[in-house]
Image: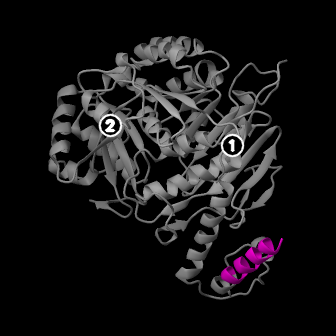
């Protein structure tokens, strides 16, 4: 009891020292830590640092492993080698001049690449595209590999998730995908790769990164991000999916993580329609008692996304992970809430995000007890905050799971093993609404207890801020690390037979 009182007193003194005169803290938070709401015209940098410190310290208390942990996880099916370079630098080396941006669903030339890169750079948004011309792609890939300071990394959502999961010593990980010699050499030695997944050559993906404030011509990036493209036939056709499913019987996992569906989009409608049906058939062969997490990624074809959502994949998986672009596009494709929006403006509104998450679980998940859908969990992540939305009765430890995801985003973006509060900043709103429309609840995020919780129907939402890295070193794979970490700390509740 004395320790608790002392901790509260120390917190009040620390925050009081830094926040004396701050008009920016909501009244509820000031009352919680026992400070008056003094008015002052200035707020020092130390003020902001203290908030980050309070949140980071609170995370460490909140993040605890569940009582029932996964011991074996199978991950598939996209894997490759990422070649990471400066986007502006590479395009300049290719003798491409800056100009106006224009999105392309599929890239056919260097000009398409330039236009699509500028389109997303000026928005500070991530995107991934298929490059149709094999010879031109190989020429660009050679230039990228020879570019000064080019770096090679493990790539592909499945391989990146597998790499993150393999850092937990008591967790056995199976990775299935097109694994070439270079990728095999780079993988964590604890990862099990079936012999049928090994191939003679690697698949390469080019990652064009840009920094916050970086300029090219008249374009300036509002935040750091990356543009990804490839000519990847193996991953594009999810050629390893059947091999993956066949390997599950011997491996006997407790959780399956599936990714790579977005790679099929660039293959053309006729091919993806047929292949998607085969993919669904393969997924249905996975024993029903094994939960499946689906990791989504950037897509542009509304018909393809609609097929994944309405009648094909999403209803037969237990969990999905996605970012703000994928969430809005998913709603646009199926004419869900806020589908009239072209894009998010600034930090995505929590109320609008909450509306779309609820709609997915009600219309395409198991929020309705009579529904035959399996989807009960959505892990949403954006730069400033994360939300975990779960149907009541299916998942536990979600406050720890969502904060673990936020913590890894804060540390990994800065290239660190733990959060350094001097290198991060709070961008999440401290006050927001549970919905964009009535009835809605006004919520306050308390930095000392940095998980806001609300319910809508039988869906519970857990939201936590991200301490955003001021100068990120690498943005690729953050979403995969976030989802992997969230899964490690999640607990699937045992269901009573009907």
Disc 1 is placed on an element classified as loop
Q: Which residue is mark 2?
A: 229
Please state which of residues 253 and 37 is positioned toward the viewer in this rendering: 253
In the rendered structure, the answer to whether residue 450 lies left or right of residue 105 reads right
Does 133 sit left or right of 196 as displayed?
A: left
Q: Nearer the viewer, mark 1 or mark 2?
A: 1
First to last magenta residue range:
1-15
User: Which quadrant of the figure has residue 5?
Assistant: bottom right
- Residue 81, label in figure: none
> Could you tell me which secondary element the residue under label 2 belongs to?
strand
**At which x and y percent is residue 358?**
72, 39
Q: Position of residue 99 (x, y in %)?
A: 27, 52
Give residue 49's position: percent from left, percent from top.
Answer: 56, 75
Asked if the stretch drawn in magenta spans residue 5, the answer is yes
Where does the image place residue 356, in percent across and percent down from the top left?
67, 40
Does residue 190 show up magenta in the picture?
no
């Amino acid at each position: 009891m004395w320790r608790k009182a002392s901790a509260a007193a120390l917190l009040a003194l620390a925050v009081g020292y830094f926040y004396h005169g701050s008009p920016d803290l909501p009244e509820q938070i000031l009352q919680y830590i026992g400070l008056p709401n003094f008015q002052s015209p200035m707020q020092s940098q130390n003020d902001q640092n203290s908030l980050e410190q309070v949140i980071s310290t609170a995370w460490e208390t909140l993040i605890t492993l569940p009582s029932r942990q996964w011991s074996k996880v199978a991950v598939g099916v996209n894997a490759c080698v990422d070649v990471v370079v400066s986007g502006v630098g590479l395009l300049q080396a290719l003798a491409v001049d800056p100009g106006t941006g224009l999105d392309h669903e599929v890239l056919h030339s260097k000009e398409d690449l330039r236009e699509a890169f500028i389109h997303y750079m000026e928005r500070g948004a991530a995107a991934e595209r298929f490059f149709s011309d094999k010879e031109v792609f190989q020429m660009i890939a050679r230039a990228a590999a020879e570019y000064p300071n080019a770096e090679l990394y493990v790539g592909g959502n499945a391989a990146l998730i597998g790499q993150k999961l393999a850092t937990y010593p008591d967790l056995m990980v199976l990775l299935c995908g097109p694994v070439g010699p270079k990728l095999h050499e780079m993988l964590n030695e604890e990862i099990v790769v079936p012999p049928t997944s090994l191939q003679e050559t690697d698949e390469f993906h080019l990652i064009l990164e840009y920094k916050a404030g970086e300029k090219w011509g008249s374009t300036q990036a509002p935040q750091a991000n990356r543009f990804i493209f490839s000519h990847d036939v193996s991953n594009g056709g999810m050629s390893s999916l059947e091999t993956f499913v066949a390997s599950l019987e011997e491996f006997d996992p407790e959780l399956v993580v599936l990714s790579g569906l977005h790679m099929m989009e660039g293959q053309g409608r006729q091919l993806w329609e047929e292949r998607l049906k085969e993919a669904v058939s393969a997924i249905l062969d996975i024993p029903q008692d094994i939960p499946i997490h689906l990791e989504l990624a950037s897509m542009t074809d509304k018909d393809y996304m609609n097929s994944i959502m309405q009648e094909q994949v999403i209803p037969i998986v237990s969990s999905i992970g996605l970012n703000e672009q994928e969430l809005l596009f998913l709603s646009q494709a199926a004419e869900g809430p806020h589908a009239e929006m072209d894009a998010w403006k600034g930090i995505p509104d929590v109320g609008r995000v909450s509306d779309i998450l609820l709609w997915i679980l009600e219309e395409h998940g198991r929020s309705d007890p009579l529904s035959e859908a399996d989807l009960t969990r959505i892990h949403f992540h954006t730069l400033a905050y994360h939300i975990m939305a779960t149907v009541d009765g299916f998942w536990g430890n979600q406050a720890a799971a969502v904060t673990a995801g936020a913590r890894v985003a804060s540390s990994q973006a800065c290239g660190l093993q733990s959060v350094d509060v001097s290198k991060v900043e709070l961008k999440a709103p401290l006050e927001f609404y549970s919905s964009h429309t009535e009835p809605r609840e006004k919520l306050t995020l308390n930095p000392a207890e940095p998980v806001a919780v609300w319910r809508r129907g039988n869906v519970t939402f857990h939201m936590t801020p991200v301490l955003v890295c001021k100068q990120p070193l690498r943005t690729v794979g953050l979403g995969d690390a976030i989802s992997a970490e969230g899964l490690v700390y999640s607990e699937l509740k045992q269901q009573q037979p009907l």
